[in-house]
Amino acid sequence: MSPHPHPPLKSVPVPVPGKPQGATQPVDAMSVGEPKGVAEGVPTACLPGPRRNDGRFPIAWLHIVAPRGAVPTATSKCACGRDRSAVGQARVLALIDDHTAHRDLCPLRNPQEGRAAA
C-alpha cells in the first residue's frame, strides 16, 4: 500500500494545509444586461436608423430579367395604372425606351394644371 492513498474518483478532495488550492468556481447566476447575439469580439452588422419621411416614394418600376443564354423579359409598371411587359431582346429594349419616355408623360409625376387637366 502506498503512503498516500488516493481518494475515490467521485469524492470531493479534502484541502490539505500548505498546498495550493484550485480557483473558486463561479456560481451559475443570471447575467445582467442585454443578451448578446454573437460571441464577444465578433463584429455585427450595423443597420441604418429609421429613414426620415422626405415625401418621396416610388411611382414607376421597371423589372428586367436577362439570364445568360435565355430570352430576356421586362415589365414596366406605374402607379397611374400603366402595366406593360415585353419578351425578347428587341421588345425589351423598346419597353425600356417607352418606360423612360413615360416619366415625362405620367400624370402622377407631372400634374397638369388648367385646361390640360380637364
Image: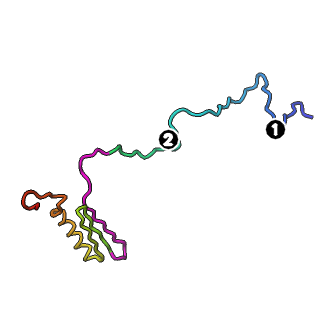
Q: Residue furthest right?
A: 1
Q: Which mark is residue 9?
A: 1
Q: Position of residue 88 (x, y in %)?
A: 29, 77
Residue 63 colored in magenta in the image? yes
Q: Quadrant of residue 59?
A: bottom left
Return the disc, 2 or 1, that comes first in the chain's sequence: 1
| Residue range highlighted in magenta | 51-71
Front-lying residue, 26 or 32: 32
Amino acid type of the residue tagged 1 in the rendering: Leu
How far apart are the two marked residues, 2 and 1, measured between alpha carbons? 38 Å
How many C-alpha atoms fall within 10 Å of the one at disc 1: few (<14), some, or many (≥20)?
few
Q: Residue at x 28, y 76 (%)?
A: 89
Q: Residue furthest left?
A: 115
Question: Taken as a whole, is the magenta stretch helix, strand or loop?
Answer: loop
Q: Quadrant of residue 97?
A: bottom left
Amino acid type of the residue tagged 2 in the rendering: Gly
Q: How many circles with numbers are drawn on the protein?
A: 2
Q: Residue at x 24, y 46 (%)?
A: 54
Residue 3, compared with residue 76, is above or below; it is above
Residue 82, compared with residue 11, is above or below; it is below
Which structural element holds mark 2? Answer: loop
Q: Is residue 46 found left or right of 101 in the rendered image?
A: right
- The residue that disc 2 covers is 41
